[in-house]
Amino acid sequence: MAPIIRTEKLTHLFGAGTPFERAAVTEVDFAAEKGEFIGVMGHTGSGKSTFIQHLNGILKPTSGRVLLDGEDINATKASVRKARFRVGLVFQYPEYQLFEETVEKDIAFGPKNMGLSDEEVRERVREAAAFVELPEGVFQKSPFELSGGQKRRTAIAGVIAMKPEVLILDEPTAGLDPVGRKTLLRHIRAYRDKTNAAVIMVSHSMDELAECASRIVVLNGGRLVLDGDARSVFARGEELKGLGLDVPHITRIALMLRGMGLPLDASVRSVQEAADAIAALKGGGRGA
Amino acid sequence: MTDVILKTEKLRFFYRTGDGLEAAPALDELDLEIERGSFTAILGRNGSGKSTLAKHFNATLLPEGGSVYAYGMDTRDEKLALEIRRRIGLVFQNPDNQIVSNVVEEDVAFAPENLGFPPEEIRSRVDEALSMVGMYEFREHAPHLLSGGQKQRIAIAGVLAMRPECVVFDEPTAMLDPKGRDEVVQIMHDLKEFYHTTVVLITHHMEETVDADRVVVLDRGRVALDGPPREVFPQVERLRALGLSSPVTTELLYELNRRGFRLPLTELSEEGCAEAIYRALNA
């Protein structure tokens, strides 16, 4: 299946040609297919945020290309504009992006700019709010009156209302408590399940990525250094540590048990999976 | 004989909305005592009152009802505010919001400078604070070019330049990557172990708190659970009901027990957890 979005030798230099020139992203080849849930990891300064801002045209490559459905998004002004609606980007702490008088108007901003009719815009707002479980009772409130969690959901609804085919989220659960994190991840997965969008999620939480992502991509010093299915990437604990990252806590425990001689699959991705795998060892004894 | 340095008595606090007082109190007749030299973790879901409580410890917020005593001083007494804040430092979540200068050592010198200390005194405090956080080699760097973890360490150094006896950390690792988080957690433990600083840590990350002396869980402005980690974290269902979780180790042991194992839920460290499982499988 052809990827919905792809980068070819994507390079971005800050301050190109000046004494302060710095390569933030170097020759990154990346592709995402519809319906994939891809986790992006990397130490602070690895180029993750710079990279993802190329995918919806906010940043233009110094060299290399970004292709949406095979077409260069930076070919014309019109193609960049279209990319902004088809590729939705939710920044970190998205509540800082809220600006309108009412929640409804803020969520409607994107769809309105897409030239949809009033009725379609209203429908989009309702759908998007329902997705993030934002009650219609807050529609007429000022976004600044809401709780932190509601503000965040409003900001995300504003992006989902455009029905992007590629949804990119930069550390969406940063600052949320455990319940908040679980709920938000559930909403993101529901959006992907319903629309078959490609979801690209930047995260420092190995545990979250282990749960949600089927594929992991690792950036280091602006380069793509690892790209594979989540299980195999997380099984490479030492390598990840060397890249300033870590493996999920559950993987660490599984690796320890393997180190003690237990024939345990160290690519377990959740507490439930690990408990099942360990319990299976009890039944038949070692080597079963 | 316990030596209590922070004490709240029936502490009440409301955040005000545009039209008067909020319906539910952020802190609801909360009683809490913190002992000198201890490492206390305060947990709770968003809205439970933890950050609000943290800000009362050094008189950033003042009580609507009840009282807060810091080293025996009533935080409501304006004349004592400066002394209270010298003894109790507060570190926030966002490093960028705590750094004001273009040069690391100038930022760390900010507080002592404002208090008019002599230059040699400022110099030695800045050097000491930067060494304590492992950032002395970066003293002439520009803060905005540092990583999140490094910036947060500078922010901590800025607080340490005041030689506080107690430091309250309000979700200090929320915006940091795993490496940065480890650095900050290490500093908090070093402060307690080597400098005998009283540490209060407000966080969502359970794994950061397994080595704390005491864990206090807040719910709707009141204390819901209070005890050493080995007593609090095994209460898996209760913590879930309070909108939290237990560390991964506890959750794994709990799930195994539901599958017929008999494992102690008090093994919080990854090594202890793995060893307990290994022993059970080889019994």
Image (tube, rainbow, N blue to C red):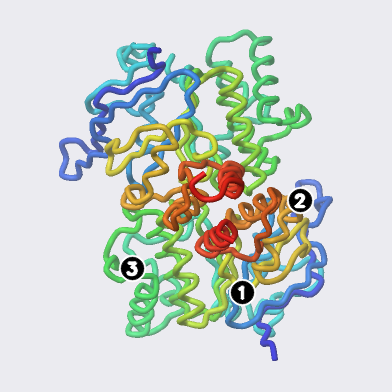
Chain letter for the residue marked with disc 2 in the picture: B
Residue B68 location, quadrant: bottom right
**Front label number (3 vs 1):** 1
Q: How many marks on residues?
A: 3
Secondary structure state at the residue bearing disc 2: helix
N-term mark: 2 or 3: 3
Secondary structure state at the residue bearing disc 1: loop
Residue B214 placed where, x, y %?
65, 72
The foreground one among B104 and B200 is: B200
N-term mark: 2 or 1: 1
Label 2 vs label 3: CA separation? 41 Å
Residue B176 vertical position relative to residue B272 in the rendered view, above or below: above
Chain letter for the residue marked with disc 1 in the picture: B
Badge 2: residue crowd in 10 Å (few <14, some 14–19, many ≥20): few
Residue on which the image places disc 3: B135
Residue B6 placed where, x, y %?
67, 78
Residue A88 visible to an observer of this rendering:
no
**Which quadrant, please, contains the N terminus of chain A?**
top left
The residue that appears at 48% across and 47% down in the rendered structure is A287
Residue A78 location, quadrant: top left
Specify the amino acid type for callout 3: Met
Residue on which the image places disc 1: B213
Q: Residue furthest bottom?
A: B1
Residue on which the image places disc 2: B241
Is A22 situated left or right of A73 in this image? left
Residue B137 vertical position relative to residue A201 in the rendered view, above or below: below
**Front label number (2 vs 3):** 2
The foreground one among A153 and A9 is: A9
The residue that appears at 71% across and 58% down in the rendered structure is B49
Residue A266 visible to an observer of this rendering:
yes
Specify the amino acid type for callout 2: Ala
Label 2 vs label 1: CA separation? 23 Å
